[in-house]
Amino acid sequence: MRTESETSLALAMRPARQLLTPANLALAVGAVALIAPTMFQVARDSWSTEQGGHGPLVLVTGLWALWRERRPDGVEKKPGNPVVSALLLGITLSIFAVARITGVLEIEAFAMYGAALSAAYLVFGSAVLRSVWFPLVYLAFTLPPPDTVVEMLVLGVAVRGAALNIVAMPISRRHRNENAASTARS
């Protein structure tokens, strides 16, 4: 209920005051301490290469999409279940610690992202996360994929191509032209 003494500025600041609790501020400091070193390493090791050069662009456009999708009145900001949040944070932070110790940047980055999503669930709840699902998925493309996943995908394409080549089924225009030329010669 609104009283006469409340101004529109006071009404606008009410949600900000609810978010600026000591627990949320501690969570924000922890998130920055977790995210900053990993993202600096991602920027140095991945974004500086041809394969990861798209990372900064995806990050900026993903943050813009996240900002654009915010709905002040459309979705109820109900904090997530603390037990589920603690479980998710425990798992992702454990994976993060092991990956950080072993120096596996790809796993570290995805564990960091999972921990950030777990913390966002704790603060904002599942309804808010569901309402911004696309920017959250899109932002995951700022992180380098694990080399094993890339190799598995590339190897799968190579194996399928080789199998099709064995049975003389053309898999591209170049192969189709080569097969037609070899058939015409015989």
Image (spheres, grey):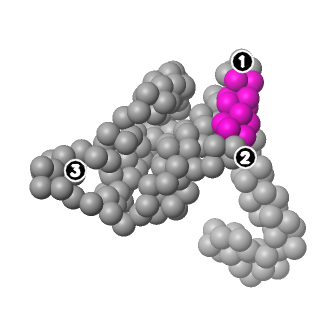
The image quadrant that residue 176 belongs to is bottom right
Q: Nearer the viewer, mark 2 or mark 1?
A: 1
User: 63 left or right of 172?
Assistant: left
Judging by the rendered image, the residue that carries numbered circle 3 is 12
Q: Which mark is residue 167?
A: none
Q: Disc 1 designates what residue?
A: 101
Task: Give the residue type at disc 2.
Answer: Val
Is residue 65 highlighted in magenta? no
Quadrant where the N terminus is found in the figure: bottom left
Whether residue 172 is visible here, answered yes or no, is yes
Residue interval drawn in magenta: 85-99
As helix, strand or loop, the secondary structure at mark 1 comes to: helix
Question: What amino acid is at disc 3?
Answer: Ala
Residue 173 position in % (x across, y down)? 62, 72
- Whichever of labels 2 and 1 marks the residue nearer the N terminus, that label is 1
The residue labelled by disc 2 is 149
Q: Position of residue 165 (x, y in %)?
A: 81, 67
